[in-house]
Image (tube, rainbow, N blue to C red):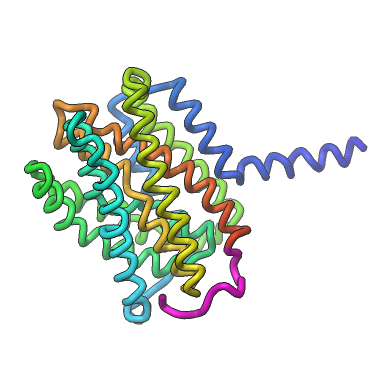
Amino acid sequence: MLIQTADRVPMALAGVVSDTRAWIVLGVACALIVGPVGEASSTLLVVVLIVQMTLSMDGLSFNRESLSENRRPILYSVAACFGVSTVAILLLGSLFMGGHPDIWKGWVMLAAVPCAVSVVTMSFFSRGNTTMCVLSLAVIYLAALAFTPFLTRALIGEDVSVARIFMYVVLFIAVPMAASVPLRRAGIGRATRIVAINAMLFLLVLLSLGQNRDYLFSEPGVVLLAAAACAVRIFAVSFAMLYILKRRGASRGNSMTYIPMAVWKNSGLGVTLCFVVFSGVPEAAMPCAISLLVELLWFAVFTRYVERGWPEGSAAQRPADG
């Protein structure tokens, strides 16, 4: 009996450290307790995102043929990010335009930034077409060099540093791609990668939410309204897309890229840009901070739902490029 109990302990521990939801809950709790961690938080956040992307890209390889083969899915992914996602954010964010014009600026910034680099993690966990996801991510970030400052200027009249966005392209795509090459030789197992990626998600929540803890407590009514708007644009849009794509017989692997591209924005980048562009209006970053939390909660819920609602290899898919 004692031997059986001893055997169950490491198995239970392995289950906990592999559970994304447990890491997210722990990150939220620590963020609310610890709060801001100081000026080093931005640098730490960059490092966390680079490590997360590197781990997600480990084992990937693609070439010019891959780009050509995935041309249409890449265009669909760009449309999901800068079409479906941006329009949904602006529609819901317009609720704040009259009464909270400074917070409206944050919604515009959230709509303008590209999707989160974590969509690769989503594709990895849901066993989607990760190669196409990485290719789409690169195209989207290159497009963001023009799209993000254009949309911000068009709706607010403020300029955005193109150089800063370009820096994020290099840090979050080029550097992880290069770092994944030597990492591939290490032969890290899937279970180890999942635990490491979960740890990075924990740090992402801790750093991003912790920096905005004070505003969350000082304006609960506005925060709740923003959280409700984020929940609608993330959960409603993602499950509607899941229903439509599955019903139309779309490729499951590609759909696991289209859906996160349409709901998961780079809210961390949005927070950073809000602090830089709207330095005298700290509450402008609130929509992006709330969005980050809701997106991570959605990630935990959606990945678990997809395992049952659209399992890999199910009959409700076809090997097409749709």
In screen coordinates, is 102 left or right of 255? left
Q: Which residue is painted at 32% across and 27% down in the image?
A: 222
Task: Report if residue 182 is visible in the image.
Answer: no
Q: Which residue is painted at 12% across and 53% down in the image?
A: 150
Task: Report if residue 133 is visible in the image.
Answer: yes
Q: Position of residue 313 (x, y in %)?
A: 61, 72
The magenta-colored residue range is 310-322
Q: Position of residue 260 (x, y in %)?
A: 41, 56
User: Residue 157, relative to residue 260: is it above or below?
Assistant: above
- Quarter of the figure with the C terminus: bottom left
Q: Which residue is painted at 11% across and 42% down in the image?
A: 156
What is the residue that sits farthest to the right in this orientation? 1
User: Residue 276, relative to residue 80: is it above or below?
Assistant: above
Q: Which residue is painted at 60% across and 58% down in the image?
A: 307
Q: Tell me, yes or no, whether the highlighted magenta stretch contains residue 44.
A: no
- Quarter of the figure with the N terminus: top right
Towards the viewer: 77 or 94: 94
Q: Position of residue 23 (x, y in %)?
A: 54, 38
Q: Tell me, yes or no, whether the highlighted magenta stretch contains residue 317.
A: yes
How many marks are shown on the rendered structure? 0
In screen coordinates, is 194 left or right of 221? right
What is the residue that sits farthest to the top in this orientation? 218
Magenta residues: mostly which secondary structure? Answer: loop
Dividing the picture into quarters, in which one does residue 259 lie? bottom left
Q: Position of residue 288 (x, y in %)?
A: 30, 38
Dividing the picture into quarters, in which one does residue 45 lie? top left
